[in-house]
Image: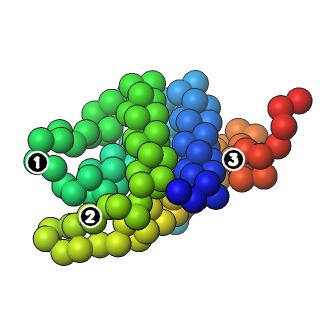
Amino acid sequence: MNTHLLTQFHHNLWANLKVLDICAALSADTLNATDGGAYGTVFATLAHIVNGESWYVWLLHGEPASVQRINAFEMSVADMRPHLEKSGKALIELAGAADGLAPTHQGIAVPAGIILAQATMHATEHRTNITTILARNGIPKLNVSVWEFHSPED
């Protein structure tokens, strides 16, 4: 097990929850804000992150038909949190077992490392969309960097 890889996924979970928790307190107007070049509104981007992480976990498990996929677009921001926690913890567990995984997508073998890399890159890209929209709407810059994650609490 590569503990360095696990650190990346612990950071991913921490950063996702930090952004989500800030967004849970936002007004409907701010949740509906967007910016050119971003995925969509703050709300749509959050839902996209939640759905994406759930999908990556599903892929890494081999696309089991028994797993019901979620649709975060039909949830409140607060209701997204347990799903994001669950998928984030599952990604940490799956990253620790990646060498034993043999995922497929639509019958085609996909290296687990590709899915794991995409999971963190996807979340990072869209967290940046959200923090940029928030900053342009007067909400102070939210630091979800790896350095901030590593910093000791004050």
Relative to 91, say whether 43 is above or below: above
According to the picture, the residue beneath numbered tag 1 turns out to be 65
- Label 1 amino acid? Ala
Q: How is the image coloured?
A: rainbow
- Label 3 amino acid? Val
Residues at marks 1 and 3 touching, judged by CB atoms closer than 8 Å:
no
Disc 1 from disc 3: Cα separation: 35 Å
Residues at marks 2 and 3 touching, judged by CB atoms closer than 8 Å:
no
Locate residue 114 relative to residue 131 in the image: left or right.
Answer: left
| Towards the viewer: 92 or 86 | 92
Element type at mark 3: loop
The image position of residue 96, as x and y in percent, is: 48, 53
Mark 2 vs 1, N-terminal side: 1
- Label 2 amino acid? Pro
Relative to 60, say whether 37 is above or below: below
| Towards the viewer: 53 or 66 | 66
Relative to 120, say whether 135 is above or below: above
The image position of residue 128, as x and y in percent, is: 60, 56
Quarter-wise, where is residue 141 in the image?
Answer: top right
According to the picture, the residue beneath numbered tag 3 turns out to be 144
Q: Can the viewer see residue 123 in this picture?
A: no
| Towards the viewer: 98 or 149 | 98
Residue at point 25% right, 39% down? 70
Residue at point 18% right, 41% down? 67
Q: Which mark is residue 103?
A: 2
The image position of residue 115, as x and y in percent, is: 39, 65
